Amino acid sequence: ACGNGLCSAATENCFTCPSDCGICPGCGDGSCGGTETCASCPPDCGVCSVCPNGKCEDYETCAICPADCGQCQPIGCLEIVFCALQCIDLEQEPPQFSIACVANCVALGCADVQFFVDQVLTCAVTVIPECGGDAGCIQKECDEEFAACIGATCN
């Protein structure tokens, strides 16, 4: 059986059970191609998340899998913005960010708040070349958007 530490040639191979049989040739080259899948080559193809399967796995959140992770509690605009800004690495040149991380943050808000979050994030991304990693500069340049965000609430 897969996961017992022994590669049984009759029922297992590098594609069906890499934990017992090792990774397949080509896995780890940075490209998910050919017969590689998330099951046979997580380094190239990403993690397999199954929703719903009764457990909230690493790459699942309340936003993308409420069946496993529970319903999201709507949060305010500034909380969402600060969550999303944590997804941006301003120390890198150019800044690096995770779209999935930002999307998960935005999904935590109700539709009324998401509009204002979008306004703040659009402004922030626009002024990053001018402000670099200076959060104070970003806040100053996007002052109107932040002010509108503060007033946005979920009904």
Image (cartoon, helix red, strand yellow):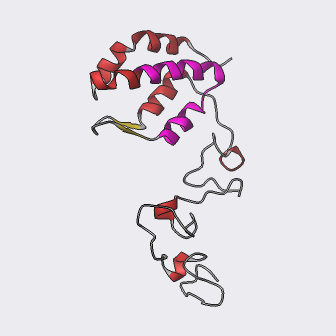
Q: Is residue 142 rendered to the left or right of residue 132?
A: right
Q: Residue at x 49, y 76 (%)?
A: 24
Q: Main secondary structure of the magenta part?
A: helix
Quadrant (top left, top right, bottom left, bottom right) of the C terminus: top right
Identify whether 16 is placed above or below 128.
below
Quadrant (top left, top right, bottom left, bottom right) of the N terminus: bottom right
Q: Residue at x 56, y 87 (%)?
A: 7
Identify whether 137 is placed above or below 40.
above
Q: Position of residue 40 (x, y in %)?
A: 55, 70
Q: Position of residue 88 (x, y in %)?
A: 39, 36
Please tell me which residue lies in front, 136 or 118: 118
Q: Is residue 84 rendered to the left or right of residue 56?
A: left
Q: Residue at x 35, y 14 (%)?
A: 141
Q: Is residue 148 magenta?
A: no
Instruction: State which region is magenta.
Output: 99-123
Q: Position of residue 69 (x, y in %)?
A: 65, 47
Q: How many marks?
A: 0
Q: Position of residue 54 (x, y in %)?
A: 71, 56
Identify whether 153 is placed above or below 50.
above
Place residue 61 in its image quadrant: top right
Q: Is residue 110 magenta?
A: yes
Please tell me which residue lies in front, 25 or 97: 25
Q: Residue at x 60, y 89 (%)?
A: 8
